[in-house]
Structures are given as structure tokens and as C-alpha cells.
Amino acid sequence: MDQNLEQKLDAVMETLTEFKKEFTALQEDFHTHRLEFSRLQNDLNAHHLEFSSLKSELADHPGEFQKKTVERLERIETSILRLETEALEDLTNVRQEFSGRLTSRDYETQALNKRVLQLEGRLESLEQQ
């Protein structure tokens, strides 16, 4: 009977180890996405500043070229703002997925912890006999 409990405890520990590995992988993925988002945000901010500067310079020079250039820059700026929004939505979706996975793993971990406690109780009662 003791061997059976030990096997069950080993199985529970193995499952917990797998959960820990998966959790670590999820953390690494989340960190990678966060770094990528930061890099994209920095790139977009740099482009936004550059376009704003060009827009200001062109505002000082009247003419058709200026008008066309400003229109193009406004379209580019709109595209950049859209990309910023999409990047934020992507990061939010990744975070929600990560949170969902963690919640699922929390429930599984709680169930396993409950089983471990039950097995420990049985083991103690067997040891007392």
C-alpha cells in the first residue's frame, strides 16, 4: 500500500514539475512579447517624431509640394496610430491568453495540492498503524 501512495505522490510531483516548466515557458513567451512590443513602440515613437518634425518644416514652405507632402504625412501618421492601436490590442490579447492559461493551471494545481494533502494524510495514518 505504501508503494502505491509513493507512486501516486511521484505522479503528482511529476505533473507539478510539468506545470512549472509550462509556466516558465509562458513567462518567457510573455517577456519576449513585452520586449517586442516595447521595441515596436520605440520605433513608432521615433517615426512619429520624425514625421511631426517634417510636417512642421514643410508648414513653413507654401506650395503644392507642401500640400501633397502634408497629406501624405497625415496618412502615414494615421497608419502609425492604427499600428500602435493594433500592437496594443495584440499585447492585450496575449496577456489575456496568458492570464487564462495561468487561471487554468491554478485550478489544476489546487486540485493536485488537495490530492497531495489527502495522500499525505493517508500516508501518516498508515505510518501510525
Image (spheres, rainbow, N blue to C red):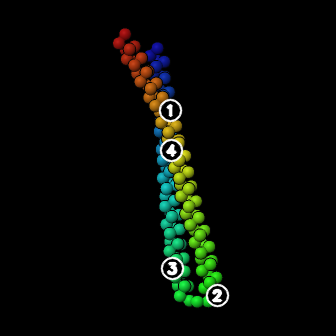
Task: First in sequence, mark 4 or 3: give its number.
Answer: 3
Q: Is residue 110 left or right of residue 76?
A: left
List the residue tagged with mark 1.
108
Pinpoint residue 65: horizontal percent, then vertical percent: 63, 86
Q: Do callouts 1 and 3 mark residues in contact (Cβ within 8 Å)?
A: no
Residue identified by numbered label 2: 64
**Label 3 crowd bin: few (<14), some (14–19), many (20+), radius 10 Å:** few
Looking at the picture, does residue 13 appear above or below residue 62? above
Element type where label 1 sits in the image: helix
Tell us which disc is closer to us: 3 or 2. 2
Instruction: Describe the element under mark 3 as helix, strand or loop.
Output: helix
Q: Secondary structure at mark 4?
A: helix
Mark pair 1, 3: CA separation: 54 Å
- Identify which amino acid the numbered label 3 is placed on: Ser
Q: Amino acid at mark 1?
A: Glu
Residue for badge 3? 53
Q: Earlier in the sequence, mark 1 or mark 3?
A: 3
